[in-house]
Image: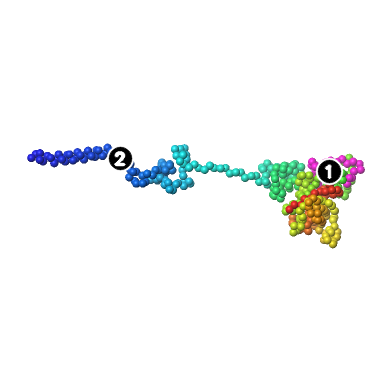
Amino acid sequence: MYWYYKWPLVIIFLLLTAGLGSLIWRSCLPTKPAAAADGPAANSQTSPAAAMTTGTDAGPSAKTKLRPTSPASPASPAVRPATTPASANNANTATPAPATVPPTPAPKALTAFSRQDEYRLDAAERQLLVDQPLAARTLAQLVLANNALIPGSQEWQRVISIINEANRIFMNSAAPCPEKITHIISAGDSLSKIASASRTTVGALIRINELSPTNQLIHPGNAMHVLTGDWSIRVLKSQFLLLLYLGTDLYRVYAVGIGRQDRTPAGTFAITSKVLHPAWTPPGKNIPFGHAENILGTHWLGISPIGNTNSSLRGFGIHGTWEPDSIGTPASAGCIRMRNEEVEELYDFIPMPNSAHAFVKVTIEE
């Protein structure tokens, strides 16, 4: 009777023992990774860019830190982390930043001055103020030689204004300059004789020696300045400028008027006549100097075509005007107009054209 009640307890004990043993056995088996239960996403790997975002500074939450970048939508280059020493292990997978190419410096403009040139021009202008024209001109000529300046540009005008003023002084006073030579007056000399021998004019000798136009008396043994050289003229129609050269050096610049309706011809000419107080002879007329209808001003320099220039281009010249407001405009019938006081200066330095080799060349350009 006692054993009949004991068997249920034995069976319960065996069941408990089997259950406990099963639990112990299952706990000893290896645990399968959780990612394997997540379907197809379990085969995706965290991209290098996502791996680089893990850390305490990557974002506000752990989910943000562990979220991989989808291969179908790569990170924007604007936010892709740059390769740094801390991420050197990913350097071979990170896209390097493009190299920065320094910009190519712009070429120096043809009309630009260097700082040294600016200093020279400033100094040249100061030299003019203290009446030192040769020092001023020397500095300005250095700047002109160092720069390919465009005639009529602001830079060109600044340089030329210095040279122009200095040479105006040399042409109208006894101020010394290298192009002036010294002539010792001999017995029997006269201004006309000296001028003819030196290929200059009496008017030029009067100007540069500060003589009186009404008293041309000179004394043997005294020294005279003579400004000599080969003159030539270049007219720039588009700029309304007449450029006077001594040899190859630009010496003086004058504003001019030209023919209306493009009546001033371009080409190569030579000065073939010089007339003081000219009469104006339009077709069928002869209007004397001083008449109200005479438009030629005080001086006339007649020009004739040479070289390949059309030989029929006759009757043109460089002359003064009684209408100074027309300077800088196309207002004449074809001739080149100058202010009376300036054409007088030019007239005085152009030698008399008495032979073919003495002609002063005039080039008229568009």
Ranked by sequence position, the earlier of labels 1 and 2 is 2
Element carrying mark 1: strand
Residue 96 shows in this picture: yes
Report how many numbered discs are placed on residues in the image: 2
| Residue type beneath disc 2 | Thr
- Residue identifier under label 1: 226
- Tell me the distance, in whole angstroms, between the alpha carbons under discs 1 and 2: 117 Å
Residue shown at 46% from the left, 47% from the top: 76
**Residue at far front of view:** 308
* Residue 227 position (above or below residue 321): above
Q: Which residues are magenta?
A: 169-193
Question: Left or right: 33 with respect to 303?
Answer: left
Element carrying mark 2: loop
- Residue identifier under label 2: 31
Observer-nearest of 265 and 202 = 265
Given this view, does label 1 or label 2 mark the residue nearer the observer?
A: 2
Where residue 41 sits: x, y (%)?
37, 46
Examine the structure image and report whether residue 184 is included in the region drawn in magenta.
yes
Where residue 259 sits: x, y (%)?
76, 57
Where residue 325 sits: x, y (%)?
76, 57
Examine the structure image and report whether residue 31 is included in the region drawn in magenta.
no
| Residue type beneath disc 1 | Val
* Residue 106 position (above or below residue 321): above
Q: Quadrant of residue 25?
A: top left
Residue shown at 81% from the left, 45% from the top: 230
**Residue at far bottom of view:** 284
Question: Left or right: 104 with respect to 342?
Answer: left
